[in-house]
Every structure is written in structure tokens, then in C-alpha cells.
Amino acid sequence: MGGVPLPPRRVPRSRRGRAGARAARGSRSKRRSPGRLGGGSGVGAARRQDLASARVSGPCRGNAGRRTVRVRFAPSPTGALHIGGARTALFNWLLARHEGGELVLRIEDTDRERSTPENVEQILDALGWLELDWDEGPILQTERSERHAQALGALLSGGHAYLSNATAEDVKAYKELHGADRGFRGEPEAGGAVRLRVPDEGATVVHDLIRGETSFENVHLDDPVIARADGSVLYNFAVAIDDLDAGITHVVRGEDHLSNTPKQLLVLEAAKAVGLGGEAALPVYAHLPLLHGPDGKKLSKRHGAASVQELRDAGYLPEAVRNYLALLGWGAGDDTTVLSTEELVQRFDLERVSRNPARFDEVKLRWLNGVHIRSLSVPELTRRLEAFTGRQGLEGAARISQEKIHTLADFWPLAGSLFDGPVDDPTARERWLGADGRAVLADVREALAQEGGFDESAVQERLQDVLQRRGLKPREVYQPLRVALTGSTVSPGMFESVALLGREETLRRIDRVLADA
RNA sequence: GCCGCUAUCGUCCAGGGGACUAGGACGCCGCCCUCUCAUGGCGGAAACCCGGGUUCGAAUCCCGGUAGCGGUACCA
């Protein structure tokens, strides 16, 4: 499975980040040895210890047998990519780029009911927007059905799997008969679905980089169905075979898969036993804590922006989303919260991934997005705003709005009236454009109408003149003017806005207010 | 039911036997800056789930309880 150089990395900028990270890492290769799973080398002990010793004992430079890190992101196209999936994609991407490894994109479309080409497109679109690229794929799982059938046949003839017509009810009945903690074991039949034969003795242990070792007693496991009666394979089988064939070294995915892992490990072991997969070591696992909504419940529509597309439409920057998502379940270790993608790549480390579930907090995302917006150059911010709004010529307004907006979507409500004319806000009019306000406006008009410069400082001088002459508070002058120009009590700075509108348009808008008495 | 994972401010992330009067960030409150809205600066309130045990010493290790979550599909 080497070098089918598939889709070009979608995004040039992420290439940059990658190259940078690679350079920065230099020759100091700190890599955990993958595949210590195989021989059950019994690294035992607690998680930290395990990781530490794994790191120390890891092969040094130039040692034979070390594989480059190969990870995969394997979404199932049963809906739009949600932020949980996006976070999984990001962590895989960060690990691959940090280690100078490879990321495989695989589409797990074996669910014939729910998988659609549209959803595949959505996922690709979401990854594109997030600027997460991959090195191989997308591989459609269903396109590998021949290989799956072959592997399935091997397990069958090797006695690691058998045909069974047992139904879910049969399994339930079996357990009632044998006690609830006794896994289902079927009798081979002439036809039916394919079940994997789980050993009665022993335990299957999952070596997890985040959680340490988790042991599952085989006796508790049911013989899982790995293929339907029609021969089509099921998830836990396809995943195992695909990971094996792809030479995946690290399986990084949501914690909801932890309980599936022993089944996949059993498939993997059976596959190796019948000679599948060559010398490749089995992958190590890293199960990421799940993401929940603000209420601690499963993420859903009612929590606001839950899919990547919704995040984009809400005006978030992809780099801010990457930054925020990285902070869900991971921390840089020194309390740094604002990180560029390059820094993320440099500092990302599976060992620092937390084990607790995290809640998606859009308020913090908004703040972080504001930070990223303010760090953009004006031309770059302008480019983003123009793409987002579909309008052109936004640079001046972008400049004077930059420190006031948190998302791209905040921009138009704030500054749109500078382009499209005042909005209609009766409350604002009544409050600021009464007799007093208009009297002030008349003076303002006179001051602004004078010949001379009209840049921000010139405007400021003229308005301050009015202020002093009439002995008014700043707001008593600026608010009527603001409402006259924008229709609203909220806008970018007054001097900046007036200068941007220009003398002609400013006077026209003031006159319009003065005219309808 | 059974199997498994998890448990520090409202939220996210630190802290992994003594340096903890538990640190940082978001949010919240107050003050300063200020033409609105923001930004920025300063200050404040705010947490180790409960119970045992180990230890001279436990937020940290162990056990139990509780709670949340995941799995238990011819879904993924």
C-alpha cells in the first residue's frame, strides 16, 4: 500500500506547517515504538510509566523494524461531519504531521442503509474547509469487498469463524440460560451469518496510549457476527482487515470504540493466525475522550453549530476551530491556549491527551475566534470577509471593524450600513435624533462641510471643535451622528466611519435626517 | 442486567505522594481606558464526587460506593 499518490493535499498552507514542523523536529526522533502490542510484551504498570518506558525503550535512529507512523481517519458517511469527528480527524492529522508520518483517509461505508455519496462529499468538503489533508485515500471500504471476502474465507476455513443462524433473540436466550455474564457461543451450521469464534479462556487486552491497558475477559464476549448471511462484511471485521492491510500503526479514534477493540483485536489475531497481513505488527490504540454538548449530553442540533459546515456558516475561522478543537482533550502543558496550527503540530503529543470527556463550549470558541481574527493582517481579513459576505471593497471597513468582531458573521451587522445605508431602528432615532440631536447634527454638518482634509484625524479635530463650542459630552455629539449615518447605536469608531464614508456621503446622510423634520 | 471507561472552579486544560493558602484560559463580577460596540489593562468570586485504606504525609496510590458516558445490532 505504498505510494498511490492520491489527492493532492488539499491545502498548501498545511504543507507549510508540516514542513516547518519537520524541520523544527530535527533529528531528535522521539517516537514511541508502535506495535508493542503483538507479543503482549507485558509493559504492565500504570499508564504514565508504560508510556515513559515505551518512549525510552523505543528504537533509536536507524534501527531496523521501525515503521513510520501511519494513522487513519475513518468516518462513516451517515451524516455531516460533526465536531466530534472533526476533532478525531484533527488529532490524527496532528499526530501524523508531528511525527512526519502518514494519514490515510478511509470511508467506512459498509452501512448500506445510511451511507450516501452526498455524505461522503460533505465529509470531504468539511475536511477541505478545516484544511486537514491526507496522504492516501479516500479509500471506500465497500470497494474492498473482494479482499474482505477473501479474508473472511480464510478465517472460515481456518476454523476461526463459523456460519450461524442464531438471532439476537437466540443470543439473549443463551445468556439467560448460562447467566448474564457468559458470552454467546454458537454451533456451526450449514448457512447463515458469519460469527467469529472467541476463545473461552483468557483475556484480550487493549494497549491504549491514553488509557493504559484494558483487559476484556474473553468469556464475557459474545461471538460477534462479522459478516451478514449474504457475505457482506460488518464493521468490526472490515476495520480490522483494513487497518492491517493499510499498515496502520496507531488507531486514534473516539472512546466509543474502546469496547469494540477486543473484537477487532480478535479478528486481527485470527487473521494473523491464517497468515494474513504478513509481518506487520498490530496497531496500538489511542481512544480519545468523547465530546458532549454544553449540557453534558450527546452533541446534537439543539446545541447550535454541531457540524463543521455550521461552524463555517457561523463565521468561524478554520484555524480557530483547529485551535479550539485541539484544546478539547489536549493541552499544551504550559497553559498556553492560543496556538497557531504550526505550534499545534510542533507540540501535539498523544501522551498529553486527557481521559475525561469534554464539553463543546461555543462561547470559548467565539472568544478564541476573535483572537485569531485580530491576528490576521487587514488584507487577509478582508479576503475572508469578502468570501464570507460575497461583497467586494471591504478593506476599509475590515480595518476599522477588526477589533470589534468575534466572527466573520459579526461583520455585516456592524459595518454593513456603511455600504447599504442606514438601517431602520426607531428606538435609536427617538433616543438620539430628537430636537437636541438635530441641533447638534446641524453644527456637525457645518464643521464637516468645511474645506480641507477628511482623514480620521481631520474628522476628529472638527468634531471635537463642535464638542467644545457647545460644551457637550462626547456621546451627545457622536451618538446622534452615529444614528444619522448608520441608523444604529452600534458601529465602528465614529471618526473612522466618517472618514471611510467620505465627506459627500456623510453630508448626504446628515442632510437626509435634517430634511425630514 | 452484563462488560468497560471516566470523575479538579459553571466550562476547558494544568498539577500524578510533601513546593497546593490547588495554577492558567473562557465565562461571570468590579475597577481603569472609552464616542457606541468592542479591544486592552488591573482586581475578585469560583473546584479536588462520597466513604474507607496505605503513608509521617493523599487532589495525587489502592478498594468500595455513587454519578456520567460508551458497548452489549446480520449499525458504524
Image (cartoon, coloured by chain):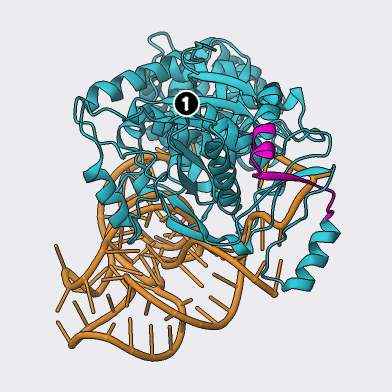
Chain colours: A cyan, B orange
**Tag 1: residue type?**
Leu
Which quarter of the rendering shows the C terminus of chain A?
A: top right
Name the residue rendered at 55%, 40% in the picture: A268
Q: Output the chain of dot 1.
A: A
Q: Is residue A96 found left or right of B70 in the rendered image?
A: left
Q: Label 1 belongs to which residue? A: A103
Question: Is A160 colored magenta in this rendering?
Answer: yes
Name the residue rendered at 39%, 15% in the picture: A455
* Residue A429 visible within the image: no
The residue carrying pointer 1 sits among few (fewer than 14), some (14 to 19) or many (20 or more) residues within 10 Å by Cα, namely many
Q: Which region is colored magenta?
A: A153-167
Front residue of this view, candidates A472 and A255: A255
Q: Is residue A43 above or below residue A159?
A: below
Count of numbered labels shown in the rendering = 1
Name the residue rendered at 19%, 30% in the picture: A28
Residue B17 place in picture, x, y as percent: 21, 70
* Secondary structure at numbered mark 1: strand
